[in-house]
């Protein structure tokens, strides 16, 4: 006979961990208790020593699908029990993390499609292993009454499942069935209910087949949906949403359907089928309406994340466009009244339901590289998330602080005594609606977890406005490109000096210019700028970022380049105006941004004077990239300045495919050259590295030359990762500043 106490830390609350422990203990004839507390799960065990050893082994390897163990502490005990029991939340202090919304699990999907199951065709089927969480929760503890499911009284059958520790719906807060759960309603945009439940879905499908645009309420908000094979419907959606060129994602019934429209390898298939169900950027087979991809060679595809989407696609048997229902640069809409008032002219009807959404969330986006996902946006299925500190420190720094993140693609993060709380994607902070969403989500985190911040960490830009909302706290500022580097260092547990290739579009630099093509040596909270791309004049600030012929003209003037290709993209009437602006430096700021150099290069090669969405130009260049073309432009290094004149001479003279390939290969060669100049681990960070062709070639070259390199793991390379870099900075303040 042996008695032990086990403390389990990690993602072990709200994921079916206690019933898993209960079943495991019962099967091994062990007695004791399991309960949630403020730090994790506590287990008391007594029984045969051999069975206890087997319990510990299986505890680590047979986890519930959504669980994650970060640490286990085992100690001896003298307590004896004659049974095994789950201690309820009323008997212990209940603390559960806010978990993201997960896609439907295989067991629920089977039940959904099983005519003999009582939840057959129940559009809101879920269990402990899947379904909504973040979108529903109003407060902790995570009990049904504190979610938007509180208004739905469970029927006896659902209640019995909810109370049974051997059932996978044990304490699954959104559990319901067709008798006691949410209901569907099909509405016109004036609020008139046309049909309910089964008939609502039928009317929706009939209208989709008829070319209509439908707003469908999902887990985290409304999608605008139309038949992806109906060219007129797709064009109408893009026209109504005023996004004529931005690519659209499609949702496919299953992997077989997805393979009809994209080339999909084994790793990509695994990501598509995961419980995250993210949008995966895939190589297109170019048999969809051209307006979907709009000149790029990839297509975003995801599989149905909810039972409602499965039911819809099963009956429609055609891929659908599924894009967020939101006004430009604002958060996704979550209720019908908002939808009708803000997007009433964009969609024809709405498939609504009466399960309220407290916290909106967008679809997560990634692409696969070397069998791993590279994330571009982290939201549904991934965020919010709680991450244990991974720096191998003997003593975990004590304290609590907020990292505000970036102005663009914002998400914030909070550090508290060894844990990092990461928010989902919020958006660009230039919109009042997004700022309001930031404030609401932050207040939710503060009230739920009881955070009291010791200090705030924000961006170093002097016009980083929303920092001013925290005037009562001491504010520390981190330079944008340094934060990019620190983000990767934090995720990879690096506590050493690194060489960061911090390449992106825009960020405030130490010299008050706009940086974006930076080579930094970073250690702790210090960095040294050892190299950068040659500055050029950014005309018109934000206006120049959209009118990329401004960029091309400025670089052509800088290097005294003349060509009919320049004449083609810069109207003659504009030349004298641009010359005057350059001569007098009117509304001009110097920039080293590789992102803007990418745009300028693309403007010339593609004859593309204007872009309408972020990263349009590099994406179109990537489409032209050909691995079989052995060409690379030389980027010359003069002391600490990287010259790119040769690349632009090539852009003016070479065919498009050659120019695009040689430009990307040239940057890759440059990265290798710089890495060899410094005997340090290399960090690849910043939005430029989201160019798949560039990243793939650079990593391949680094591997071939045994260069140690690091990438983000679960955070995006773009500005959404900035908050994690600010967390690293704040951690070092706690470690080295006795004030804290």
Image (cartoon, helix red, strand yellow):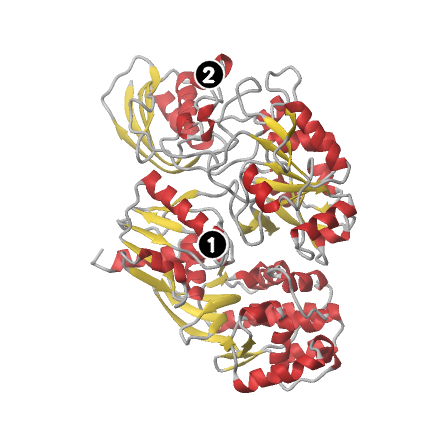
Question: Does label 2 or label 1 sit earlier along the sequence?
Answer: 2
| Element class at badge 1 | helix
Q: Which mark is residue 8?
A: none
Work out whether residue 134 can be spotted: yes
Q: Position of residue 80 (x, y in %)?
A: 26, 17
Q: Position of residue 93 (x, y in %)?
A: 29, 29
Quadrant (top left/top right/bottom left/bottom right) for the C terminus = bottom left
Which of pointers 2 and 1 indicates the residue nearer the eye?
1
Residue 579 lies, with reference to residue 313, above or below; the image says below
Q: Residue 55 lies in what quarter of the image?
A: top left
Q: Residue furthest left?
A: 738
Question: Neighbour class for label 2 at 10 Å: few (<14), some, many (≥20)?
Answer: some
| Element class at badge 2 | helix
Residue 136 lies, with reference to residue 532, above or below; the image says above
Left or right of 167? Residue 203 is: right
The residue to which callout 1 is attached is 432
Q: Position of residue 125 (x, y in %)?
A: 56, 25
Q: Residue 183 lies in what quarter of the image?
A: top right
Left or right of 169? Residue 623 is: right
- Going 40% across and 62% down the picture, which residue do you hit? 465
Using the image as rendered, state which of residue 287 and residue 367 is in the foreground.
287
Q: Which mark is residue 159?
A: 2
Using the image as rendered, state which of residue 621 and residue 409 is in the foreground.
409
Separation of disc 2 and disc 1 at Cα? 42 Å
Quadrant (top left/top right/bottom left/bottom right) for the N terminus = top left
Work out whether residue 54 can be spotted: no
């Amino acid at each position: 006979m042996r008695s032990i106490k086990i403390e389990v830390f990690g993602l072990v609350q709200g994921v079916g961990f206690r019933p898993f422990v209960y079943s495991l203990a019962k099967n091994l004839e062990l007695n004791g208790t399991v309960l949630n507390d403020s730090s994790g799960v506590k287990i008391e065990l007594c029984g045969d020593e051999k069975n206890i050893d087997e319990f510990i082994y299986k505890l680590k390897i047979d986890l519930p699908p959504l669980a994650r163990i970060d640490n286990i502490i085992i100690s001896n005990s003298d307590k004896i029990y004659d049974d095994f029991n789950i201690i309820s939340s009323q008997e212990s202090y209940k603390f559960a993390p806010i978990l993201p919304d997960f896609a439907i699990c295989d067991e629920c999907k089977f039940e959904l499609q099983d005519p003999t199951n009582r939840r057959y065709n129940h559009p809101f089927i879920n269990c402990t292993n899947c379904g909504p969480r973040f979108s529903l929760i109003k407060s902790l503890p995570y009990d049904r009454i504190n979610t938007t499911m509180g208004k739905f009284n469970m029927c006896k059958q659902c209640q019995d499942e909810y109370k049974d520790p051997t059932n996978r719906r044990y304490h699954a807060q959104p559990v319901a069935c067709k008798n006691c759960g949410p209901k569907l309603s099909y509405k016109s945009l004036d609020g008139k209910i046309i049909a309910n439940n089964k008939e609502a879905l039928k009317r929706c499908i009939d209208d989709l087949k008829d070319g209509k645009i439908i707003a469908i309420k999902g887990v985290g908000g409304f999608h605008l949906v139309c038949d992806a094979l109906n060219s007129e419907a797709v064009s109408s959606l893009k026209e109504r949403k005023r996004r004529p060129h931005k690519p659209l994602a499609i949702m496919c019934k299953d992997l077989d359907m997805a393979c009809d429209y994209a080339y999909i390898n084994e790793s990509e298939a695994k990501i598509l089928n995961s419980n995250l169900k993210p949008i995966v950027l895939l190589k297109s087979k170019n048999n969809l309406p051209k307006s979907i991809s709009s000149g790029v060679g990839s297509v975003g595809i995801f599989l149905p994340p909810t039972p409602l989407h499965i039911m819809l696609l099963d009956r429609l048997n055609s891929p659908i466009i599924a894009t967020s229902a939101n006004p430009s640069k604002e958060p996704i809409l979550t209720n019908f009244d908002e939808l009708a008032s803000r997007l009433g002219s964009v969609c024809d009807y709405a498939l609504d339901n009466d399960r309220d959404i407290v916290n909106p969330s967008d679809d997560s986006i990634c692409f696969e590289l070397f069998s791993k996902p590279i994330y571009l946006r982290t939201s549904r299925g991934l965020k919010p998330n709680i991450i244990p500190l991974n720096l191998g420190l003997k003593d975990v720094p004590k304290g609590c602080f907020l990292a505000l993140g970036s102005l663009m693609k914002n998400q914030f993060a909070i550090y508290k005594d060894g844990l990092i709380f990461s928010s989902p994607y919020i958006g660009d902070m230039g919109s009042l609606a997004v700022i309001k969403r930031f404030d609401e989500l932050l207040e939710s985190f503060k009230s739920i977890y009881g955070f009291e911040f010791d200090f705030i960490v924000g961006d170093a830009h002097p016009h980083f406005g929303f920092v001013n909302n925290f005037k009562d706290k001491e504010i520390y500022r981190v330079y944008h490109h340094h934060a990019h580097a620190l983000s990767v260092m934090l995720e990879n547990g690096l506590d050493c000096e690194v060489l960061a290739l911090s390449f992106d579009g825009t960020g405030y630099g130490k010299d008050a210019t706009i940086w974006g093509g930076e080579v930094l040596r970073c250690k702790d909270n210090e960095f040294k700028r050892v190299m950068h791309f040659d500055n050029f004049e950014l005309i018109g600030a934000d206006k120049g970022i959209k009118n990329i012929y401004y960029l091309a003209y400025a670089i052509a003037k800088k290097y005294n380049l003349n060509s009919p290709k320049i004449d083609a993209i810069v109207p003659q009437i504009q030349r004298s105006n641009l010359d005057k602006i350059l001569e007098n430096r009117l509304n001009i700021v110097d920039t080293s941004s590789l992102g803007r150099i990418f745009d300028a290069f693309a403007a010339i090669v593609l004859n593309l004077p204007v872009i309408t969405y972020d990263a349009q130009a590099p994406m179109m260049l990537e489409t032209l990239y050909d691995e079989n073309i052995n060409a690379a432009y030389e980027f010359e290094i003069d002391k600490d300045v990287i010259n790119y004149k040769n690349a632009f001479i090539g852009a003016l003279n070479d065919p498009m495919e050659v120019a695009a390939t040689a430009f990307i290969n040239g940057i890759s060669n440059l990265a290798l050259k710089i890495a060899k100049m410094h005997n340090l681990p290399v960090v690849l960070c910043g939005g430029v590295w989201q160019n798949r062709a560039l990243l793939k070639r650079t990593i391949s070259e680094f591997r071939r030359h045994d260069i140690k390199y690091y990438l983000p793991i679960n955070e995006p390379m773009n500005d959404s990762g900035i908050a994690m870099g600010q967390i690293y900075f704040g951690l070092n303040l706690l470690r080295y500043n006795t004030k804290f």
